[in-house]
Image (spheres, rainbow, N blue to C red):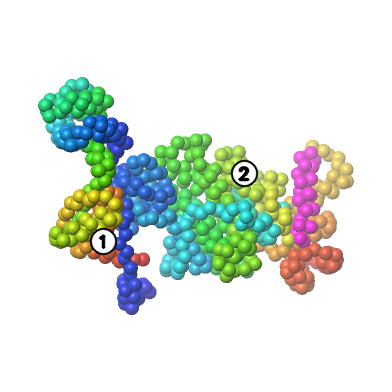
């Protein structure tokens, strides 16, 4: 996964700059998501690993699958990455592209894990508080994990705010164990 | 099953009541690779250099390599239970160890946790293991002695409080013995000792603890042990932990003595960590910063002035200087002092005590090579009586070494040369001293006086040791008040000189050995 971050960075930056200049961020976003899906497909992945196919042929294969959905610029990206033997890092490129886009649009995706389902009021309150704290727009995804017993865990990028009953009990156990 | 003293219901209740769990935002990352105790973490964008990183199951790691996309960290302790994909959290704290008076008399590991089975250590303070040494303004020159109780060292290579004196030599030349004797001799002087054992056998450390207990030296000593079985990371940080424990005393206007046994093994441990972190290797495969590794450690041993102490203690301690004296130990291979680490440490320290296997095997113990051993600042700190009397001994030995080589071939020597040789032989014999038997200043003064004033000339060489023992016993029983006077003031004047002369004359006339 993250082993490819460094390699994916220049591609993601170039793609973002191209898309930004052409104001076609949405179209690129869709195309990249499709590409990532195709490349992570197990059959495709096997093909791409195969030594029987030449580098150019692999690029052509990917383009063939998506057919006319790709613009000529997007096709060029695939060809270039195929030539450099970097098709497999497409998911990382997509990830970084989306991060760069979210950053430019001052948005952040936050994930909230709670023990019980949050009411709409609670969700709104959370969004507002996080907005104030992090200073950007929040897209919230929620999930439920009953093992937390109570409270919530909020993850936004690298930052986590752990306000769950479980972690409180864990640290109490640690402090008593000393 | 046995209950711990800390398991009383009331105590547990109060601890639960006082328990304060703060919710705070922390950054989290994922372990992406794990090999030989080195973990690479993705995420943790705002980790600090040297920060403690929390891993699952109460394990901690120390961040050492901050790279663009990952953080390289070294696990402190065992890493068997960690797997790729585990979460790693920043703690926002630099690695810290407990410090304080309660550490004395205890054996702890590199993180300051007790390993002597005597229960938890009641300390309130902690200090970061890595600290910047005091600056120029805060220092004071070295002018008080640390008495090691070894004649050869106190007379020829004196050590001052706040000095860094290297003990260097091959294996089995008595390096540790010198250090342990120095610790034993600090009993009752108020100098607190810290002995840091790095990469040694656990049995050796246990022996040292037992010996110190036997000689009543454990009360003023802390032992920091990172034995050979512990991870390289622990061996690497052990000296810094010990140093922080010693700085507690220095900063509060007291005197402390720290022994790093030995820094060669610490350099090896650091080399291992560095190579596993893929830092480029240099000479002897050590990383580029191996000089800084030792220089930043030894620079923390210093004497600080009263203003520093007053400011540090916020006015609680006034008019007292503090000191941390360091005795680092370096083991050479086959007497090679020009290897990488020995030359580095020689150039950092304020002098060295050079121990030789040839001397050791010839029965001269401590096996100090008087020619190569120097102390660059200790002379200013020597007790005045030892300074006056010790100069002659050093000179006699230097001349003896020069002549001894020639005298091997010459059959006919003039009387002056013969006298010089005979004195040299006797002084060499006189500098021998058993382990765990440190001498007081007065005892040393009498021994040196006897050598300087020719009392040894009519003692056969093989009787010198017996003469010394009998003479000291006689002085103790018949001239106790003179000895007490010397021990108290350390001054040398005509009165004392005459008194010593008459006492020795008396022993010469009546003494038996």
Start and end of the magenta stretch?
A: B384-407
Q: Residue at x 58, y 51 (%)?
A: B299
Q: Nearer the viewer, residue B390 or B501?
A: B390
Mark 2, mark 1: which one is toward the viewer? 1
Residue B326 against residue B503 in the figure, above or below: above
Q: Which mark is residue A163?
A: 1
Check the picture and name the quadrant holding the N terminus of chain B.
bottom left
The secondary structure type at the circle numbered 2 is helix
Q: Residues within 10 Å of mark 2 (few under 14, many from 20)?
A: some
**Residue A110 x/y as whole percent:** 23, 51
Horizontally, residue B513 falls left or right of residue A90, namely right
Q: Nearer the viewer, residue A104 or A42?
A: A104
Q: Which residue is mark 2?
A: B347
- Identify the chain of the residue marked 1, using the numbered disc in the image: A
The secondary structure type at the circle numbered 1 is strand
Q: Residue at x 33, y 68 (%)?
A: B20
């Amino acid at each position: 996964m993250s082993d490819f971050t460094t390699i994916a960075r220049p591609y993601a930056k170039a793609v973002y700059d191209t898309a930004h200049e052409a104001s076609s961020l949405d179209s690129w976003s869709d195309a990249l998501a499709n590409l990532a899906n195709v490349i992570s497909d197990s059959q495709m992945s096997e093909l791409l690993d195969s030594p029987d196919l030449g580098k150019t042929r692999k690029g052509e294969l990917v383009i063939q699958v998506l057919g006319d959905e790709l613009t000529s610029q997007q096709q060029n990206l695939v060809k270039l990455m195929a030539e450099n033997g970097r098709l497999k890092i497409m998911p990382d490129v997509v990830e970084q592209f989306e991060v760069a886009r979210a950053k430019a649009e001052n948005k952040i995706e936050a994930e909230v894990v709670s023990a019980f389902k949050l009411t709409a009021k609670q969700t709104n309150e959370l969004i507002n508080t996080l907005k104030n704290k992090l200073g950007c727009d929040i897209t919230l995804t929620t999930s439920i994990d009953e093992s937390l017993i109570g409270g919530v865990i909020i993850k936004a990028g690298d930052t986590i705010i752990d306000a769950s009953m479980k972690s409180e009990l864990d640290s109490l156990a640690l402090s008593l164990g000393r | 099953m046995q209950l711990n003293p800390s398991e009383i219901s009331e105590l547990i209740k109060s601890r639960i009541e006082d328990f304060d769990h703060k919710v705070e935002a922390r950054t989290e990352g994922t372990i992406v690779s794990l090999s030989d105790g080195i973990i690479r973490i993705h995420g943790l964008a705002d980790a600090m250099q040297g920060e403690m990183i929390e891993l699952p199951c109460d394990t901690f790691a120390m961040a050492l390599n901050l790279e663009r996309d990952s953080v390289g960290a070294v696990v402190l302790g065992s890493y068997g239970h960690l797997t790729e994909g585990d979460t790693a959290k920043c703690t926002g704290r630099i690695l810290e160890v407990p410090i304080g008076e309660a550490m004395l008399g205890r054996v702890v590991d590199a993180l300051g946790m007790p390993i002597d089975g005597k229960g938890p250590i009641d300390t309130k303070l902690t200090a970061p293991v890595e600290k910047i040494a005091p600056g120029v303004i805060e220092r004071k020159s070295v002018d008080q002695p640390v008495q090691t109780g070894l004649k050869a060292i106190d007379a020829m290579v004196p050590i001052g409080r706040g000095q860094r004196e290297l003990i260097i030599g091959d294996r089995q030349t008595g390096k540790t013995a010198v250090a342990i004797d120095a610790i034993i001799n600090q009993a009752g002087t108020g100098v607190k000792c810290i002995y840091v054992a790095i990469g040694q056998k656990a049995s050796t450390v246990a022996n040292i603890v037992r010996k110190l207990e036997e000689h009543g030296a454990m009360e003023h000593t802390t032992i920091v042990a990172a034995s050979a079985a512990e991870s390289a990371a622990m061996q690497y940080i052990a000296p810094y932990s010990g140093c922080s424990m010693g700085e507690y005393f220095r900063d509060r206007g007291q005197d402390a003595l720290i022994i790093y046994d030995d820094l060669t093994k610490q350099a090896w441990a650091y080399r291992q960590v560095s190579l596993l972190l893929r830092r480029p290797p240099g000479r002897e495969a050590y990383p580029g910063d191996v000089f800084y590794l030792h220089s930043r450690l030894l620079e923390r041993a210093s004497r600080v002035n009263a203003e520093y102490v007053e400011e540090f203690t916020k006015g609680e301690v006034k008019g007292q200087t503090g000191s941390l004296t360091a005795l680092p130990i370096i083991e050479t291979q086959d007497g090679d002092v020009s290897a990488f680490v020995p030359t580095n440490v020689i150039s950092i320290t304020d002098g060295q005590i050079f121990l030789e296997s040839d001397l050791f095997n010839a029965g001269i113990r401590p096996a100090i090579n008087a020619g190569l051993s120097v102390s660059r600042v200790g002379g200013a700190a020597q007790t005045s009586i030892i300074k006056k009397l010790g100069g002659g001994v050093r000179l006699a030995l230097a001349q003896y070494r020069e002549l001894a080589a020639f005298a091997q071939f010459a059959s006919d020597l003039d009387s002056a040369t013969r006298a010089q040789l005979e004195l040299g032989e006797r002084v060499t014999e006189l500098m021998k001293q058993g382990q765990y038997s440190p001498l007081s200043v007065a005892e040393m003064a009498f021994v040196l006086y006897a050598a300087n004033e020719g009392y040894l000339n009519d003692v056969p060489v093989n009787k010198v040791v017996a003469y010394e023992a009998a003479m000291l016993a006689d002085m103790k029983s018949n001239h106790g008040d003179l000895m007490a006077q010397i021990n108290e003031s350390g001054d040398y004047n005509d009165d004392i000189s005459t008194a010593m002369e008459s006492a020795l004359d008396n022993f010469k006339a009546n003494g038996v050995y």
